[in-house]
Image (spheres, helix red, strand yellow):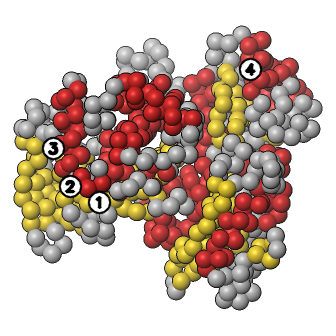
Amino acid sequence: MSASTHASEKPTFDHPLNVIVATDCGSTTTKAILIEKVGDEYRQTFRGEAPTTVEAPFEDVTRGVLNAIAEIEELSGRRILDGEKIITPCRDAKTGVDIYISTSSAGGGLQMMVTGVVQNMTGESAQRAALGAGAIVIDVLASNDGRLPHEKIERIRTMRPDMILMSGGTDGGAVTHVVEMAEYIAAAEPRPRFGATYKLPLIYAGNKEAQPQVRKILGEKAALEVTENIRPVLEKENLAPARNKIHDLFLEHVMQQAPGYRKLIDMTGAPIMPTPAAVGLIMETIAKREHLNLIGVDIGGATTDVFSVFDGVFNRTVSANLGMSYSISNVLAEAGLANIMRWVPFNIDEQTLRNRIKNKMVRPTTIPQTLDELQIEQAIAREALRLALIHHKSLATGLKGVQQERTISDAFEQQASGKSLVDMLKLDLIVGSGGILSHAPRRIQSMLMMVDAYEPLGFTMLSVDSIFMMPHLGVLSTINENAATDVFVRDCMVYLGTCVAPIGRLKDGERLAEYELTFPDGRVVKDQLKMGEVRLLPLGLNQKARLAMQPVKTVNLGQGMGTPVSREVQGGVVGLLLDGRGRPLQLPADEPARVAALTKWFESVDLYPRSQG
């Protein structure tokens, strides 16, 4: 087998890949899955998991990997391990695998610092490049960020990132600011987080005229790599070369320092990817293949990642302070208590709620034991999801500093474009992932958390990742796109159904729209949707029906005020959700009315069945 070592090149193989074992080394758990070719299609057949072993006493990530694979061996009856080696390629029908691949976010993932000249121009472009490569951006330094030189130097010195990405200036422009930033970095002599003996990887992707000076200033101080400018001209972003370089350096430098990774790199048949980069890759692959606009979210214990693809443009953001366990108190601080309490369907005093949130932060691995605890946790999740999307919209923008269209009024000043690419009316699909969404006791709970947090407009499909295998499929898509998309569609994605949300607000109980739903068997349901109502209609997995809706003249279904819409809607394990609560969503201000409204909505979709309470 020959597999190339660079992340930016596609590996080639001299034997068929019919049996694949993949792992994702997370910060707490290492998850392994087995994928096999069954007939003409690939299916995910067995899975195993084990605690990640990157910290003491083991300090060797491969121990957790071998333990997770051993569980697959036991369940499948296939012999995969020979001592501490993985048997590749397959020897016979029950021995070995054709390839082993992996992703990793163990050790806190990839932490980067980025620099630019103008904060909301090259600074933001650099941030998008790093985020797209799967990094957590711990700071953005820019010439105009308001910090004094000594403050910038001190900041670079104390942050200890895994890597720095330097950008700034368009090709052929002034070099002064870029050179100045290089001098600050040189003065700071930054040390990497892991491996005190090696030089910090630093990528320069700015004005090419400044390359010689940057090499002179930083060549001795860091492991310097020079690549194409990420903003060669004001009107264009060129992020791919910098992203590929980040992947390569992640493997060559950062991963080599983490305990046991050298062994892991030797075991894999394709480059290891940072977990978020792999999740982003499968989202991008699916969006392009199906011609979809999508938003994906992965809500974890410490961070929430949001991915979007609109008109073929991919963006990723990390809200590093929004999560459901370690960062749960940050959600409270950022959302405010009132915003969390507005989703709790019973009366609770502020202090009790604060105490429950603090308990979760102190004991992050606990899961809700009572219905009250579950409802509180799902209320917090709504706010974490909502805030992470607001953050994502602010970064997933058109290029700032670019003149979009000249009119007399702005001919005198260059207007920043900065318009968000995330357009909820163009959105086709929302994909949810992470414990709170993938493991909710009822699928309708996952669906409603996403609908409440994102307030989709018009017609939108919703789905969740069944067992969190998107990272594995992302890295698999780099070597076998067919296998990755087969498994994604058949085993990974659980389609929940379609949400139909009229835009507009009327008085409670007033008619929003008349609708007529024609089922595949010819059965027709005619009714009206009133303001303040939520309806769940049965429409099963792989079922499609025709929905014709006539909104009243002040209500819009995506085609304009009062314009009727007739289109095919797809079912799912939950069904067809008609959301008549209006957009934007507004909850009653006074507590008894709010609790009554939530109770009515939750009961109408059987969100928390009585028998469980």
Reading the chain from its start, which is encountered first: label 2 or label 4?
A: 4
Q: Nearer the viewer, residue 69 or 22?
A: 69
CA distance separating discs 2 and 1: 8 Å
The residue located at (64%, 15%) in the rendering is 144
**Disc nearer the start of the sequence (1/4):** 4
Q: Quadrant of residue 525?
A: bottom left
Q: CA distance from mark 2 to mark 3?
A: 10 Å
Amino acid at the residue labelled 2: Leu
Q: Secondary structure at mark 3?
A: strand
* CA distance separating discs 2 and 4: 53 Å
Q: Are marks 1 and 4 in contact (CB under 8 Å)?
A: no
Question: Which disc is residue 574 wearing?
Answer: 1
**Residue type at mark 4?**
Arg
User: Mark 1 and mark 2 in contact (Cβ < 8 Å)?
Assistant: yes
Kindly state the secondary structure of the residue where label 2 is placed: strand
Residue under numbered circle 4: 155
